[in-house]
Amino acid sequence: ARAVRRHMQAEFSVLGRGIEPPGSRECWDGPEQWFAALRQGPLIKLWRRAMEEGQICEIAGEALPEQAGPAQENCNRSLERVVAFPLEVRNRICGVLMAGLLPAEDSSEDMAKLESYALLAASALDRECARQERTAWKKSVRKIIEDSRECLAVIDERGVVHETSRSAAALLFPSPGSRDEILLEDIFSGGARDAVAQWRNQFLGPGSGAASQWERQQIPLEAALHGGNVVQMRLRSKIERFGRGEAMWLIHFQDQSARRTLQAAKGRLEVELAGLVDSIDSGVLLFDVEGKIRLASDRLASILGFKKRQILELGNIEDLINRVACHFTRPVETMARWRDHVLRDQEASWDEFELNHPSRRVVEQFARPLYSPDGTRLGRLEVYRDVTGQRLIHTKFLQTEKMAALGQLVSGIAHELNNPLTSIQGYAQLLLSRRTTSEREGDARRISQEAERAGHIVKNLLLFSRETKPERRSVNLNEVIERTLSLRAYELKLQNIAVKLALDPALPKTLADAAQLQQVVLNLIVNAEQAIVQGREEENGHGRIEIRTRCLAGDRIVMQFCDDGPGILPEVASRIFDPFFTTKPAGVGTGLGLSIVYGIIQEHGGEVSVETRPGQGAKFNVELPALSAAGFDLVPQETAALPRAPGAAPLPVSCRAVTHPERILVVEDEPTVAQLIADVMAEEGHQVDTLLDSRKALGTLEEKNYALVICDLKMPHMDGKGLYRALVRRASPLQRRILIVTGDTMSPRTFEFLQSSGLPYLAKPFLVEELKDAVRQAFAAAPSGEEINAGREWLRAAVRKK
């Protein structure tokens, strides 16, 4: 500013940054009166216009106010014009050089001089800006390095340490003291100094060009510090134009002592974890979010029938599921459920399945996701427990309780059964004495209806009382409720207790043991009935039970049992699920009913609770998980009307009609039943032979060619099982053309035989139409023509041999 006024015809000059003229005299030269004029309108507008337009701007001296000029008498000079030069630094207008010019002979020369001064001012501002940016850059780099969690240090070309991160300072300089001019090798022990200096010279000395920089960064060095810790150094990067322009180098340090300690701790933890999971009685499987198997215990390998090494070699959970599939009792259904649990990896799940290999056992599976402390999902943990023995004991216990409940049903069922039997016997006697055809038809119709009613009662009773192996499959809860209620309906009717059903027709199925759920429903119905009867004030009072089913959120279903009994006292409600606890009089309850309900529902992954108020009845809520994965309805449920062996091939309800008569052999030791079957088959157009002595069956089959054998399962001498096995030993094609008729569906051995053989069967008592349907189904599943011809050849060979 002084140079502009001294070497030019200028009254004043000013230099400043910003949109306004400077308020201080630091960059001002000229009379005091003109400095005051800077803050007035014309000069402020000129300054702003130069900043905004980025061009040279000027105003004439006459545009200035009169008071802006000098007021002394000896100051008689007047301005010709005021010129403002914008100062551009790094493509940005950051300041203005303004000068008040006096009249001159060569104004163009003055403007050129003034422009050169403006360029000089812009250069000074550029140097100042670069210095500030360099200082800020140094501070930011220093801040980044200091705050880094890594052990970082910055050294110059001489090897002097300039900056360190906090973690590096704690590692390299454990004791406080002066750190000025400390070389990198000075912080290492004496034996390591030369090695550190030589390693540093690889990238600081001659021949350290950029071409081999990547290779040098990959060469680490391990050396011992003065304190004894071993560190690994690695060149991280080169920092160009640091400070005054010299190159700097960023070095990364890693405490090898801590890493080795961490590795040792990790190895010890893995050994301890493996020892822990191998010592518990449950199998453990751990896999990550990608499905890769991370850990498998010896117990899991033993349960699944593999070696631990084989499971780990499979690699992922999908390969394990496919490999184990052949060991399941129901492979397709179990695989579908397992895959569904794996897909629903953000929630805990529970399941139970049955294995046939390496031995027959029931396995309980519990799975849950694993998360890190910050909420990141790490994988999934599955725990497998062999509950075969527990299920066997529990089944025996349930069967005992079922027999106790059966005793409560006997009196009502016997009374209900006596009613149709009385009608059958009475109408049969009337039928013998009737003379008109219409009367006989009416009597026969009533006898048929009452017999069907009695048969339905017996079948429901047998289904309930049969001792079955625990087996979980898809179950329709509404059907279980309706079938169980029919067992108690007559007794409830005698007690003047009305039952209202509100069952959701769209209720999804649940994975459960149907027999155990039937036990739960019966116990809750009987519990409600006893509470109503016990709380009546008069002997012939009325009661009400309501049973509801509906869906809940989160793939859950619920059934509710509500009664209008006296309710449960608050001090009693917390103990009603305890074993042997009962509020009923002696001889009325065992104290096990509700505890069995609780145990069964808990084993099925559900919950049971009670809501009650004294004098306002009780409501029991039973929640169960609903099936949501595909492939669960692969095993058909047995029905009370026409049971089928689970191993038998499914047959259509509507079968093809037999277009030509066939030859049928009936083997039945009960004459009336044998004659009934023969008469029905004769009406269908078949040719029927009957045998009351099963010992003659094999000889008859060798003499004649039959399309179907209808055989009773329980007979003296040779039963149906013995006949079937004899045909199997002789490789007879007739082994696949047998229809079993039996009244013994309670025995576990009977059911096991029917399941293993896959033979169709018909349960006694049966209706005529049921017999016809069963025979049609047997013909529909009959062997092909080639196998029939093979049967004829077998018969001829048997005759020749005989």
Image: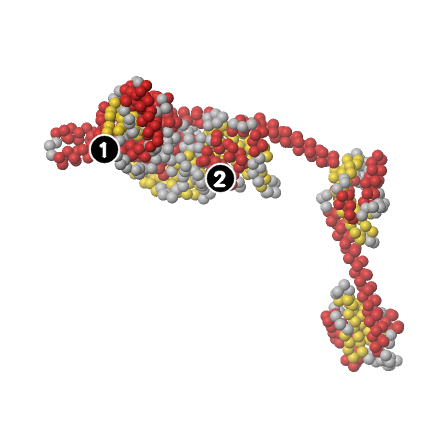
Query: In x, y percent, where is residue 11?
Result: 85, 75
Residue 439 versus residue 119 in the image, above or below: above
Task: Give amino acid for label 1.
Answer: Gly
- Mark 1 residue crowding within 10 angstroms, few (<14) / some (14–19) / many (20+): some
Query: Where on the picture, by quarter, is residue 217?
Result: top right
Residue lying at the far left in this picture: please name it.
435
Task: Give amino acid for label 2.
Answer: Asp
In depth, the one of 206 and 537 nearer the eye is 206
Q: Which mark is residue 685?
A: 1
In depth, the one of 86 and 564 nearer the eye is 86
Could you tell me which residue is drawn at 15 percent across and 30 percent down?
431
Query: Where on the picture, by quarter, is residue 269?
Result: top right
Q: Looking at the image, is mark 1 or mark 2 nearer the viewer?
A: 1
Q: Which residue is mark 2?
A: 340
Disc 2 secondary structure class: helix
Could you tell me which residue is drawn at 26 percent across and 31 percent down?
662
Could you tell me which residue is drawn at 84 percent across and 34 percent down?
191
